[in-house]
Image (cartoon, rainbow, N blue to C red):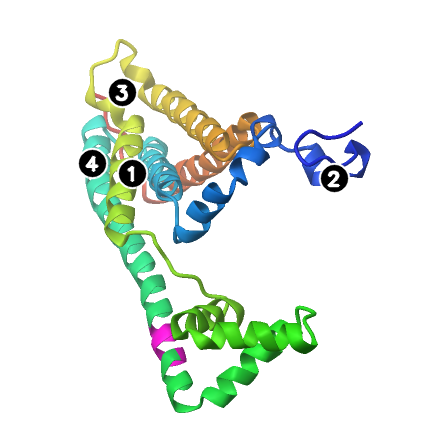
């Protein structure tokens, strides 16, 4: 039987294709490989998706804020202390996270820019050596004789193409299209929105006043699961597996924080405060 996606016998398809998420396996490859679609896809510079920034901020927001809640519960601190520490962490750590992501994205751009300037300088100063490098790169790909000569001639005829080829093939660098500002903003918003979830039962009145930590834990667990499922759906991966993975990561962080809080309470004898 033929696989409609690639017209190869199903039993000869690579193993990974047989286990791909249905949304990926049933894509219209014929439509995606129309000449105009190919040109559009290749001409668009690659870059980091906003999804990565959102997931990064959201996961870290839930983990760090619930760690404050769990640590406070382990140390038997008051509700007011949890709110103060939680919001302080939410704003400060969210800002720090977004700035770090901004600087990281900008650093990747600067690395590519610096390498591009260096390759341009080398081409101007010693074109013969760079010409040899292009030849070696494509010779390693199996090109020989007149075909190799033609490829090298076409690439070295255009300096921009020449530089881009050296960046990708020699240095394994690609132009970074992600916006550092967008990366920072998306990270900060996701951190604040998802990081606020563990604080909800402490900020808004709830009937079960003595079970605030439990309610916070349940809300955080649900948020972790939803975030993981959403990430899996966006990346065409099994959502249940993705949700479980994210949930386990958050659970481990919460247990560590609660254990540290309980240990410090035991060692230093902090007096439990009545929950408000």
For label 3, the SS is helix
Disc number lying in front (4 or 2): 2
Answer above or below: position of 101 versus 61. Answer: below
Is 60 left or right of 186, judged from the image as shown?
A: right
Q: Earlier in the sequence, mark 2 or mark 1?
A: 2
The residue under label 4 is 87
Instruction: Specify whether residue 210 is in view.
Output: yes
Q: CA distance from mark 1 to mark 3?
A: 18 Å
Circle 3 Cα neighbour tier, 10 Å, few/some/many (<14 / 14–19 / ≥20): many
The residue under label 2 is 15
Across and down, in percent, residue 231 comes to 45, 33
Q: Earlier in the sequence, mark 4 or mark 2?
A: 2
Circles 4 and 3: CB distance less than 8 Å? no
In front: 246, or 198?
246
Circle 4 Cα neighbour tier, 10 Å, few/some/many (<14 / 14–19 / ≥20): some
- Measuring 27% from the left and 33% from the top, which residue is drawn there? 271
Across and down, in percent, residue 260 comes to 40, 42
Q: CA distance from mark 2 to mark 1?
A: 38 Å
Region of the chain picked out in magenta, as a range = 114-119
For label 4, the SS is helix
**Is residue 191 a member of the stretch shown in magenta?**
no
Across and down, in percent, residue 232 comes to 50, 31
- Measuring 35% from the left and 44% from the top, which residue is drawn there? 53
Disc number lying in front (1 or 3): 1
**Is residue 115 a member of the stretch shown in magenta?**
yes
Q: Quadrant of residue 266?
A: top left
Is 145 left or right of 175, judged from the image as shown?
A: right
The residue under label 1 is 191
The residue under label 3 is 201
Answer above or below: position of 174 versus 136. Answer: above
Q: Earlier in the sequence, mark 4 or mark 3?
A: 4
């Amino acid at each position: 039987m033929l696989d409609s996606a690639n017209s190869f016998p199903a039993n000869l398809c690579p193993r990974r294709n047989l286990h791909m998420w249905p949304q990926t396996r049933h894509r219209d490859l014929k439509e995606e490989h129309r000449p105009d679609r190919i040109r559009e896809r290749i001409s668009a510079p690659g870059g980091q998706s906003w999804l990565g920034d959102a997931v990064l901020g959201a996961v870290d927001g839930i983990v760090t804020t619930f760690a404050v809640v769990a640590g406070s519960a382990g140390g038997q601190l008051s509700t007011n202390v949890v709110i103060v520490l939680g919001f302080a962490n939410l704003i400060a750590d969210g800002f720090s996270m977004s700035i770090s992501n901004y600087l990281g994205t900008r650093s990747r751009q600067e690395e590519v820019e610096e390498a591009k300037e260096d390759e341009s300088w080398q081409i101007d100063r010693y074109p013969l050596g760079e010409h040899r490098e292009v030849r070696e790169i494509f010779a390693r790909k199996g090109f020989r004789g007149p075909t190799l000569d033609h490829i090298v001639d076409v690439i070295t005829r255009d300096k921009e193409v020449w530089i881009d080829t050296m960046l990708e093939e020699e240095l394994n660098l690609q132009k970074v299209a992600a916006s550092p500002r967008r990366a920072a903003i998306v990270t900060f918003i996701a951190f604040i929105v998802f990081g606020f979830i563990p604080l909800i039962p402490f900020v808004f009145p709830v009937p079960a006043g003595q079970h605030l930590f439990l309610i916070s834990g349940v809300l955080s667990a649900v948020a972790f699961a939803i975030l993981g499922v959403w990430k899996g759906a966006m990346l065409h991966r099994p959502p249940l597996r993705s949700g479980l993975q994210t949930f386990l990561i958050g659970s481990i962080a919460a247990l560590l924080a609660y254990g540290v809080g309980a240990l410090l309470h035991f060692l230093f004898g902090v007096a439990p405060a009545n929950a408000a």
